[in-house]
Image (spheres, rainbow, N blue to C red):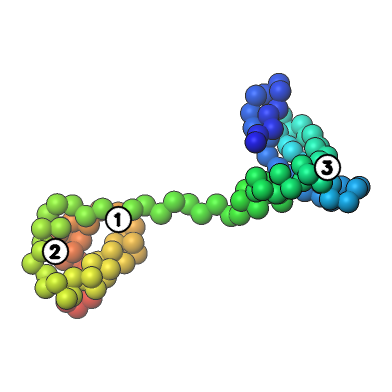
Amino acid sequence: MEILCVPCGVSMKVGQTKKGPNDGSMALKFGCPNCKSTIALLTGPEESKLIKSLNISAGSAKSAPAKPAKPEIVWTKDAEARMENVPVFVRPMAKSGIEKYAKEKGVTEITPEIMDAARETMGM
Ligand SMILES: [Zn+2]
């Protein structure tokens, strides 16, 4: 379900959710992020259930702090080929160590050079 701001045509965001005047009713406030106009929606008990089931109450998902997407670590073909030479039983440890090193350096691509640098700091 989406509430649209008619003049802007954008989806309004759930601002506040309050208990309505009647038992089981709910007052939902929606705000337009564009023109800042607000509307309130008062629901009856049955609709409140519906809205709860739609999981838009209290704006829980929206108010959660947005974490920036972590860049995925990419292994180049050369680096992967080099990993083949690492004994199987130390591979997971070496791999996580190298990725940890890369993250610390803000590197998102594992190259043989990064592997060398990481191994030096790990003493491997
Ligand atoms: Zn608007």
Label 1 environment density (alpha carbons within 10 Å; few <14, some 14–19, many ≥20): some
Point 83% across, 42% down: residue? 44
Numbered tag placed on residue 83 in the rendering: 2
Measured in 3D between alpha carbons, the distance from the residue under mark 1 to the one under mark 3, in whole angstroms, is 49 Å
Q: Which label lies toward us, 3 or 2? A: 3
Q: Judge by depth and name the residue closer to the eye, 74 or 22.
A: 22
Please tell me which of labels 3 and 2 falls first in the chain.
Answer: 3
Q: What residue would you read off at disc 3?
A: 44
* Secondary element at image label 2: helix
The answer to whether one can see residue 34 in this image is no
From the image, tell me which residue sits under label 1. 73
Label 1 and label 2: CA atoms lie apart by: 15 Å
Left/right of residue 81 with respect to residue 73 in the rendered view? left
Q: Name the image quarter holding the C terminus.
A: bottom left
Ligand 1 under 8 Å from disc 2 Cβ = no
Q: Name which of mark 1 and mark 2 comes first in the sequence.
A: 1
